[in-house]
Image (cartoon, rainbow, N blue to C red):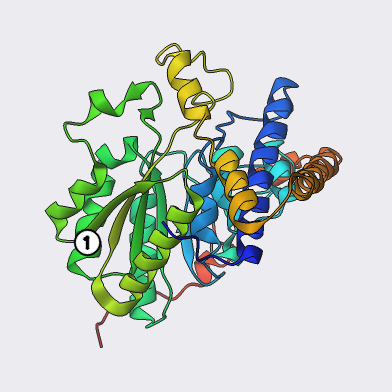
Amino acid sequence: METTISKATMLDMYRTMIRIREFEAEAIELAKANITRAAVHTYNGEEAIATGVCVQLSNDDYITSTHRGHGHCIAKGADLRRMFAELMGRETGYCKGKGGSMHIADLATGNLGANGIVGGGIPMAMGAGLGLQVAKEKHVSVSFFGDGASNEGSFHEALNMAAIWNLPVIFICENNKYGISTSTAKSMNIEYIADRAVGYGIKGLTVNGNDIVEVYHTFAEAKDYVLAGNGPVLLEMDTFRMAGHYFGDNENYRSRAEVEKWKAKDPILRCEKLLKEDYNIDQEQLDAIKKEETQHVLKASEQAKQDPEPLIEDMLDDLYDPTFEEIEWNAFSKA
């Protein structure tokens, strides 16, 4: 695929991928030190997907994320200190330390939230797309989810409703080959998840999710297609998670040979090769970006460590809208 992406955009995407990788490295160190408050699922190996997609979105475009959602949050513009604070259970976190790694949301950037329920974000993205359509806003709603979620009822229900209502939704399946420890070969009787789009009369494509250029161009085309009023699109991004399902996973369900084969397809290494060969970027420039992002991540982590934990008396806050009793309920009318 042609690299018709500007040097500035390519370097911006490379920086985002490095930021995600460095964030995950620090998250693992925090987990090892027992500083995080819940399970940590890393995005290592899948960075090109969130990056190539979110660089083309504004704060008025929505995304829904997954339990493996740090990459989506960062690519959509989340603040690293607040993310680390959430992982550590601090009151300065995005959910005031009450949600943890799997429940980060940032409405200011259009991130409707990560989700610990497999497939839980898919109908949320469909609903956001309906809201955009009703408001006649020229923006898109993007749902990130894994291959395991494509076997959930929420996936099929959301695709069906988005299709019949012609909603501006782009469904992105990050097919990393394993739903926890179950391979796609054992969990579905098809080769390509994107083929399921046929059953709903919508467009479906399978692309190399480790190729930042292919991700970028494919999403750009899908976004134009959806905004032109052609209805939703299902994009299957072929990728692989380099680490286990979560920190502490013994990975006894896949071979080291398989992992090493995919590590050779590392999206960051692939992007570095492209930057050197097609954009005349030297190793010194790449190393400088890595150093800057590493320092940025570590500074955010250290700052979050100093932040206070939630107070016990605030435990029940945020469960209900404080103005709930003042809400006036009116019967729905299409008029």
Q: As rendered, which of 139 and 255 lies closer to the eye?
A: 255
Would you say residue 207 is visible in this rendering? yes
Residue 137 location (% of width, % of height)? 41, 81
Q: How many numbered circles are shown?
A: 1
The residue beneath circle 1 is 161
The kind of residue on which mark 1 rests is Met
Pick the front one: 63 or 195: 195
Could one spot residue 318 in this view of the protein? Answer: no
Residue 234 image offset from top left, x and y in percent: 29, 55
Percent of width and height locating residue 181: 38, 21
Q: In this view, which residue lies farthest toward the bottom?
A: 335
Residue at 55% x, 42% y: name it. Answer: 270
In this view, 276 is above or below 184: below
Compared across the picture, whether 313 is left or right of 217 comes to right
The N terminus is located in which quarter? Answer: bottom left
User: Badge 1 local density, few (<14 within 10 Å), some, or many (20+)?
Assistant: some
Residue 173 is left or right of residue 246, and the answer is: left
Q: Quadrant of the C terminus?
A: bottom left
Please tell me in which quadrant of the rendered image residue 20 appears: top right
Q: Residue at x 32, y 71 (%)?
A: 226
* Quarter assignment of residue 191: top left
At 28% from the left edge and 47% from the top edge, which residue is drawn?
A: 154
Give the residue drawn at x 53%, y 44%.
69
Tell me the SS state at disc 1. helix
| Place of residue 319 in the rendered image (x, y in percent of width and height, measured from the top left) | 56, 51
> Residue 160 versus residue 312: which sits nearer the camera?
160
287 vs 193, left or right, is right
Work out whether 137 lies above or below 216: below
Rendered view: 287 above or below 179: below
